[in-house]
Image (cartoon, rainbow, N blue to C red):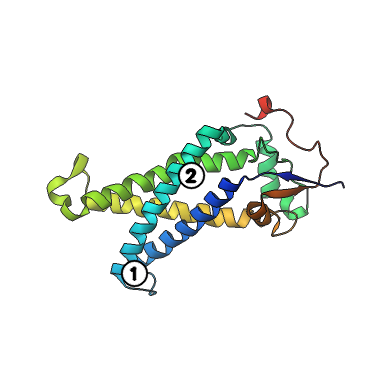
Amino acid sequence: MSTHRIYLFKRFERFWHWSQAALVITMLVTGFEIHGYLGGFDFKSAVLVHGYAAWALVTLWVFAIFWHFTTGEWRQYIPTLQKIFLVARHYAWGIFRGEAHPYHQTPQHKHNPLQRLAYLWLKLMINPLIWLSGAFLLIFSYDWIRTMPFGLTLADMAWTHTAAAYMMLLFFIAHVYLATTGHTPLTYIKAMITGWEDSYDGPQAGDSSPSKNA
């Protein structure tokens, strides 16, 4: 089996990925602390750190959105049905039998069909829910009874924010697990650190043509 190296992840992608991971973990930990599930530090400190991490994450997302649209990398997330059933079968069955992954990454097509759907769900559903519910809680929580935006209650926003946080946690757990399913448990993790990934299917192993995968 021939191998070659491909440069998949640019410097900003790697910075964005690991910074986002650190901030999401920080917000999950402080969020659990705010709800009283952990005992690492006091409630006031948890709220303060949670707020700072939230603003940092929103700032990072703004820069990431700008980068994706100015570089054209947003096209990486366009849904496709090509090979989606093969990829689903691989994760449900083939991966436990040592079968090769049916989708081969290229710099133009880094994400398989299921990844694209998962990232689309993250960016269009989970992230906006966290943004909006968090913003409402931050802006209106101190005077909610009098302002009462759109007839919502403080409990409505709190539950929405918590539900979105649990969806983010589930995405995070699945993401970490799938990151260990390469040729070795560290293959994908090393690629997101260095930007380079080893391909084991020869130099022509990438997806067929951009038009078929866009």
Q: Which residue is mark 1?
A: 36
Question: Secondary structure under badge 2?
Answer: helix
What residue type is disc 1 on? Answer: Gly
Point 74% across, 58% down: residue: 184
Q: Position of residue 187 (x, y in %)?
A: 71, 55
Question: Secondary structure under badge 1?
Answer: loop
Which mark is on residue 122?
Answer: 2
Point 62% across, 38% down: residue: 113
What residue type is disc 2 on? Answer: Leu
**Quarter of the image that includes the C terminus:** top right
Q: Nearer the viewer, residue 111 or 100?
A: 111
| Category of crowding for the residue at label 1, using alpha-carbon neighbours closer than 10 angstroms: few (below 14), some (14–19), many (at least 20) | few
Mark 2–mark 1 distance (CA, rounded to whole Å): 26 Å
Q: Position of residue 212 (x, y in %)?
A: 68, 26
Quarter location, residue 148: top left
Relative to 68, residue 93 above or below? below
